[in-house]
Each structure stands twice: as C-alpha cells, then as structure tokens.
C-alpha cells in the first residue's frame, strides 16, 4: 500500500572486518567486526572472535568469542630499530624508517589501492605487508621494492597480521571476509565468512570447505548459460558429498598449499520438478500423490515436518526413470515437505508446503531408544565416574514416558559395551516407522584421529599409539544408521570428557541429515562430571529438565525441544561457571515438537 510506511527491512548477516591477529603460538586466528570511534591505522577496532586452526592431532575449531585474558599478535610496525609510518594526512605514502631516518618510501596510486590502510613487518623484519583500497594487498622488501600482490579480496583491506613463524598472512576486509595466505608463495589458502547469526563457512580456492550446520547455504556458484538465458545458482551445500572435506581443508592450512579439485561436475547435479500438488494448496485427503519429474536422480528422500517418511534406500531409480509418484501421509494443518534428490555428484533439495484440512486419527507413535554409557574401560586410564550412570538415568526417564508421550518405548541400555554390541544395538532403529521418535544417547569418551571422530567402547585399545579401528566405533557408523532411520531422529551426545574430544563435523553431518543434535559441549570446552551431582553436568541438567524444570514457556506439563534447549543452555552454564556450553542444532525450517509429558 503506497502509504510510505516501512514494510520490510532486508539485512544480511555479514559485516566488514576491521581487525585480525594470531595467538602467540600461531594456532589461533582472531578477528573483529566492530569499528571504534577513535580509530587509527592498524587499530580500527578490537579483536572479538577466534578460530582454532588445525594441527596434526586436532581438527578445526569453530568461531568463539574472545575472552578478556587472551592475547593476540596484530600488525607490527616496529622491528628492532626500524619502524613504519605514514606522514600526517598522507596515507598514500608509507615511510620505512631506520631510527629517525627515512630509508625508503612506498607510494600507492588510484590504480593500486589509493592508500596504505594497514601495514606490518614480517617477524624477521625483512619484508613489509601493506593493504590498501579495492582489495589491494602487497608485499615489499624492506628497501621498498615490490615483490607482488595477494589477489582475492574485493573490498578495502583494514587489517593484516603475520603468524609468529612467518608462514601465514591473515587479512581482514570490507568484503566481509577474513583470508589466510601463504606468505611466501602469495597463494590464498582459506577464506572465512562469519555471519552475525553464528553461521560460518571457510573454503579453499578449489572449493573444499568446512562450515557450521547451515553455513554452506551462504556460498555457491553462478552458472551462466549465455546472454539471453537465465543463470543458475548452485549452493555449495549441494556438492557437500564431494566438497565438504574438513580433512582436506585442514591439510591445506597445515601444509600451506591448495589442493586442486574439479568443480565442473556441478552441471551434473540431480534436477527435479514437483508436478503436484501445487505449492500452498489445501488438501482434504490425508494421503497425497507427490508427482515428480526427474533428471539425473539416483535416490530420493522425503521429510514431513522434519520426520523422515521415505528413506533414500527405498527409492533407487534407474538412470532412465524420469517420472515418479510417491504416496506421502500428511499431518493436520501445515505440512512442510523437504524433498532431497541425490546422485554420485551431489544433491538438490526443494521445500514445499501444503495444508491438510480434515480429521486424522491421533497417532502417538513409539519411541526407539538406545542409551550407551561407558565408565569402565579395559584400559583403566580411560575410566570415567558417571557415564554409565548417565545412560541408566536417561534410559529410565524415557522408559517412564511409555503411555504418556509415547505409545510404547522400545529400548536398549548398554553399559561397558564392546564395539560389536553397540553395532548390534543400533539395529533396533530399523523397526521405527514414520510416526515414531528415535533417540541415541552416548556418554563416554570420544576421540579424534586423522580428522575422524570415534566413540570408545569398553574394549577400545591402541597399537603403536594409534587406536585400532576394529575396537572403536567410527562416527560414520552411527551417522549412517540414524540417517536411514524413519521418523524423528534425536542425538544426545556427552562424549567430550578430555581435550581434543569434539569434532564439529559430528554436528554438521547430523544436521545435514535432518537430525536434531544436542551436544554436551562445543569444540573448545570439556564436558565435566561432578561428584556432588553423581552425573555429568549435561546429563544432570537434562534429567532436571525432563523432570519438569524445562516446562518454562507455557507451563502446560509438556516439554518441547526448544524449552529443553533454553533450560540446558542456562543450567549448564551456571553449573560449569560458564566453562561448558551445550550445542543444539535443529534442521532448517524446524518445527518445535513435544519431547516429553509430565
């Protein structure tokens, strides 16, 4: 209506980056997105966030706020008796000074960045890095001779820093990214985008990436088909199977050399159209015929309101099969359908909404629960105090939900299990139907080795200082079982009882499969046990919440996932004095649901 009133405010989640730095050991990258009122060159704003970089025995971390006691190395304008400065109101000129004598000058012009917005010595004092306008980032000898440019940024460079060993250069830009470079070769190694919503993604020039659960929705490729045809846009998430490779990205940063890949295959992604029903249509029959037109599709998955109703294994398609009709049962009211088509190259996802107006018999659904807790290990050095007790308590509280939230509870409880017993227990999930709920609870030790995450059963053991793969449970084994299971899937994880025990891929993989994930802690903190609680902090708070303390919002004797998340976040922070922070990720388009009844 032309009344001059603001209807919508469109705002992105990106922001300019004004600061960048490295920790004293070079293993943590830091940056800031705020500009201060009284700024000056090389000090436009504070460092606010940090990301732990990978080492040979530790994967990437995830962005976290910086604590006040952390120190970082930023731009260094002084090296022994040498210093860098620009004359007042002459930022186009950078003076290289020895004591009080000007030994050389570097001047920028409109064609190469206008001004020296930020600059630093390298740790050995032999080279100078300068960032200017329009993405110009350059390296010079100490005598002012230019050696070359670091090409990639598209906005003004506001901050630079060099790692203490002189191997990595970090730059922060107006283009909303932070980049890592090989200082010597000038090759871009990694580009990081960190959104105000907490989602993030970091990618190599070849397209390999790491990301938060929804971070890979923010970047992609535009595919042009000529001046007279509309371009296509392919999200990098569609190539997840090929390009989501945390191990490769970690190796790029550690070895400081990009690893090439072919992205030309993005034109071979699966494609499909939804022929019927129409988007937003109202339907009076509970079952609908979902008609699809397909191209290069191998398998299809279908979710209704976050429940997996048709697993991909049931719909393997022949290469020449171009049409498919599937029967889908709706819930009363609004139904959010998520259709995922896959092939060997990647996947294509479409979201559809329809409304069911009509009566439907209430189906309580069953609960399928596997609770695993390992306190006692063959290797006594691994023993925990309360992991087994945690599994017992979680098992019992959900068994008590039979006849309340769930029609029937089917459960397996494992304390001190072997790897074979765990794999056998997971077969329980094969019996779940589309109306059912599936919960996997894990308490014990988790470890990272070669970038992979493993859960340690009772009989886990090492040989020549490496975990024997036959004695541990690879995360992918758990992931694959949940991914193929019908119904609503929930993963409760309390496996971070030692340093280097969390792998962010755990949450990412589960989230991509539409699994609700609640983890006891994040990458940079440890899950604690407390003798006075007789449980781990996470499980203690979980039990309290399910016993009624999480009934916060409507106080209707129903515990929803969102209520439980709010309670866990607050309670765990209090119990741990802020040292432990739980992680919950729900699928995109998540619809809150009742988890337990009082």
Image: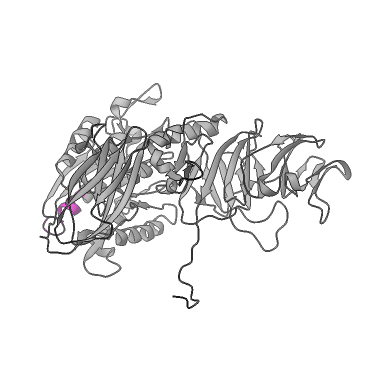
Along the viewing direction, whichever of 201 and 372 lies nearer the viewer = 201
Residue 224 is situated, as x and y percent measured from the top left of the image, at 49, 42
Q: Is residue 493 left or right of residue 21?
A: left
Q: Quadrant of the N terminus?
A: bottom left
What span is colored magenta in the figure? 395-406
Taking the spot 57% from the left edge, 51% from the top edge, the residue there is 176
* On screen, residue 564 above or below 249: below
Residue 400 in the magenta stretch? The answer is: yes
Q: Residue furthest top?
A: 464
Q: Quadrant of residue 574?
A: bottom left
Along the viewing direction, whichever of 7 and 291 lies nearer the viewer = 291
Q: Residue furthest right?
A: 101
Residue 465 is situated, as x and y percent measured from the top left of the image, at 41, 24
Residue 482 is situated, as x and y percent measured from the top left of the image, at 25, 41
Q: Quadrant of residue 448?
A: top left
Residue 306 is situated, as x and y percent measured from the top left of the image, at 26, 52
């Amino acid at each position: 209506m032309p009344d001059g009133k603001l209807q919508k405010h469109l705002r992105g989640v990106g922001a300019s980056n004004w600061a960048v730095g490295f920790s004293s050991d070079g293993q943590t990258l830091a940056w800031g997105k705020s500009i201060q009122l009284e700024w000056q060159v090389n000090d436009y704003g504070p460092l606010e966030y940090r990301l732990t970089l990978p080492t040979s025995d530790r994967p990437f971390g995830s962005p976290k706020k910086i604590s006040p006691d952390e120190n970082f190395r930023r731009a260094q304008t002084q090296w022994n008796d040498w210093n860098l400065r620009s004359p007042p109101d002459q930022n186009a000129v950078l003076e290289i000074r020895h004591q009080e004598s000007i030994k050389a000058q570097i001047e920028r012009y409109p064609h190469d960045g206008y001004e020296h917005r930020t600059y630093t010595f390298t740790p050995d004092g032999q080279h100078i890095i300068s960032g200017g306008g329009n993405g110009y980032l350059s390296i010079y000898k100490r005598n002012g001779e230019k050696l070359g440019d670091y090409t990639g940024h598209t906005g003004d460079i506001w901050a630079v820093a060099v790692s203490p060993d002189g191997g990595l250069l970090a730059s922060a830009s107006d283009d909303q990214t932070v980049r890592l470079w090989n200082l010597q070769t000038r090759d871009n190694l990694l580009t990081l985008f960190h959104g105000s919503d907490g989602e993030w993604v970091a990618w190599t020039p070849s397209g390999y990436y790491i990301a938060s659960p929804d971070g890979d929705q923010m970047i992609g490729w535009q595919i042009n088909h000529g001046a007279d045809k509309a371009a296509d846009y392919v999200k990098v998430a569609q190539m997840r199977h090929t390009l989501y490779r945390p191990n490769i990205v970690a190796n790029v940063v550690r070895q400081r050399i990009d690893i090439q890949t072919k992205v030309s295959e993005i034109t071979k992604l699966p494609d499909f159209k939804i022929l019927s029903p129409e988007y937003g249509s109202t339907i009076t029959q509970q079952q609908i015929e979902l008609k699809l037109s397909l191209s290069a599709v191998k398998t299809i998955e279908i979710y209704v309101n976050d429940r997996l109703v048709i697993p991909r294994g049931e719909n393997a398609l022949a290469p020449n099969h171009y049409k498919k009709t599937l029967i889908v049962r709706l819930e009363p009211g609004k139904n959010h359908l998520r259709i995922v088509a896959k092939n060997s190259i990647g996947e294509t996802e479409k979201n559809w909404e329809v409304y069911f107006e009509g009566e439907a018999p209430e189906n309580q659904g069953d609960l399928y629960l596997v609770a695993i807790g390992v306190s006692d290990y063959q290797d006594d050095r691994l023993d925990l105090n309360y992991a087994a007790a945690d599994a017992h308590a979680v098992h019992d509280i959900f068994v008590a939900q039979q006849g309340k939230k769930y029609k029937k509870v089917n459960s397996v409880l494992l304390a001190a299990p072997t790897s074979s017993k765990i794999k056998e227990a997971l077969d329980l999930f094969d019996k779940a139907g589309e109306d059912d709920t599936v919960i996997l609870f894990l308490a014990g030790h988790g470890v990272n080795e070669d970038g992979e995450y493993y859960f340690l059963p009772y009989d886990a053991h090492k040989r020549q200082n490496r975990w024997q793969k036959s004695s541990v449970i690879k995360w992918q084994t758990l992931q694959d079982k949940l991914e193929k299971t019908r119904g609503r899937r929930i993963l409760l994880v309390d496996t971070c009882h030692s340093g280097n025990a969390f792998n962010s891929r755990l949450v990412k993989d589960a989230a991509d499969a539409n699994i609700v994930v609640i983890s006891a802690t994040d990458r940079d903190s440890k899950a604690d046990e407390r003798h006075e609680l007789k449980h781990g902090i996470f499980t203690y708070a979980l039990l309290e919440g399910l016993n009624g303390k999480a009934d916060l919002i409507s106080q209707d004797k129903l515990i929803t996932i969102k209520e439980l998340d709010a309670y866990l976040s607050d309670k765990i922070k209090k119990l741990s004095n802020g040292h432990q922070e739980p992680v919950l990720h729900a699928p995109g388009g998540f619809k809150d649901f009742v988890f337990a009844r009082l």
